[in-house]
Each structure stands twice: as structure tokens, then as C-alpha cells.
């Protein structure tokens, strides 16, 4: 079983969405963690858009990467440039992946426009996670 860590700035949206998809699609083939270089709490809109796609992340917590210093990860995925630049040293020999997804929490406009941006980013992350798992677990 592979251990995967998803890192973002605040472990609020992008990393939580990726965590949900990676765990869902990998099933018992991977143990997935998510963390931030800061913690901002899980964004309620991220929970909502994942629920729309049949995945419950309401039980997720916002964790700081420092909490996982003793865990050996096989894969570390950064989902924003800030996390990639600020990621502390993680022990072990792990594969690194990076994709700079837009931050849906920065969306502006009406509630529907903001939710559309969350859905757009969710779908980008979903496609990326499927591709990553196809490379790493198949």
C-alpha cells in the first residue's frame, strides 16, 4: 500500500479535494493524507462540491505538514506553487508531483459564480488524480 501526502497552503480546498478523490479512487491501494504549510480549516464550499460528486470529506481535518514528519510517504503531491516553495524537508525517498491549481477560495462574484469556480477546480483536480493514480497504482 502506498502512502500519499497532498500539500497545499492552508489544507482548506485544493488539498482536501485531492485527498478525497485520491482516497476514493485508490481505495485500499493507498493511504492518503493531506496537509498545509498553514491550516485554515476545511472550506465548507469544498465539502459541498465534493458531496455533489458523491464524496464525503466533511470528516476531514485541516492539518499542518509538521504533524506528519515521522511518516514515510511514497508520493508527495503539491497542489499550489506556494506549498511547493514552502514545503519543509520530508524524510524518505518519495516521488514528487506538482500541479498549480487555481485557488477557488479566491473566487469572487455571486454565490453561484463562486460555486462554479469551486466545481471547475474540483473537476481539474479529479482528472489530475485519476491520471496520477493510473501512473502510480496500475
Image (cartoon, rainbow, N blue to C red):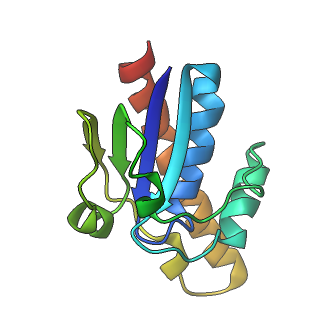
Residues 136 and 94: in front is: 94
Residue occupying the point 38% across, 52% down: 69
* Camera-side residue of 32 and 25: 32
**Residue 76: percent from the left, percent from the top?**
34, 43
Q: Looking at the picture, how far across and down is residue 8, in whole percent? A: 41, 62
**Is residue 35 shown above or below 3?**
below
Q: Is residue 21 left or right of residue 66?
A: right
Residue 78: horizontal and vertical position, in percent? 34, 53
In the current view of this chain or complex, which residue is farthest to the top? 138
Q: In the picture, residue 80 is in which quadrant?
A: bottom left
Q: Hey, which quadrant is residue 84 in on the image?
A: bottom left
The residue sitting at the bottom extreme is 109
User: Residue at position x 63%, y 21% from top?
Assistant: 28
Q: Is residue 123 visible?
A: no
The front one of 130 and 123 is 130
> Is residue 136 or residue 52 the one in the foreground?
136
Mark count = 0
Left or right relative to 31: residue 42: right
Residue at the (27%, 44%) spot, across then down: 91
Tell me, yes or no, if residue 112 can be seen here: yes
Q: Residue at x 26, y 37 (%)?
A: 92
- Quarter of the image holding residue 21? top right
Q: Position of residue 38 (x, y in %)?
A: 44, 74
Quarter of the image containing the C terminus? Answer: top left
Amino acid at each position: 500500500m502506498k502512502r500519499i501526502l497532498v500539500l497545499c497552503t492552508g489544507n482548506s480546498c485544493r488539498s482536501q479535494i485531492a485527498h478525497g478523490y485520491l482516497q476514493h479512487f485508490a481505495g485500499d491501494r493507498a493511504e492518503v493524507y493531506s496537509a498545509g504549510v498553514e491550516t485554515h480549516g476545511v472550506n465548507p464550499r469544498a465539502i459541498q462540491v465534493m458531496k455533489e460528486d458523491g464524496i464525503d470529506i466533511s470528516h476531514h481535518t485541516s492539518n499542518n505538514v509538521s504533524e506528519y514528519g515521522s511518516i514515510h510517504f511514497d508520493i508527495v503531491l503539491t497542489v499550489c506553487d506556494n506549498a511547493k516553495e514552502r514545503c519543509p524537508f520530508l524524510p524518505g525517498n518519495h516521488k514528487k508531483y506538482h500541479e498549480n491549481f487555481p485557488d477557488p477560495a479566491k473566487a469572487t462574484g455571486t454565490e453561484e459564480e463562486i460555486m462554479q469556480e469551486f466545481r471547475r477546480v474540483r473537476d481539474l483536480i479529479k482528472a489530475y488524480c485519476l491520471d496520477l493514480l493510473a501512473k502510480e497504482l496500475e
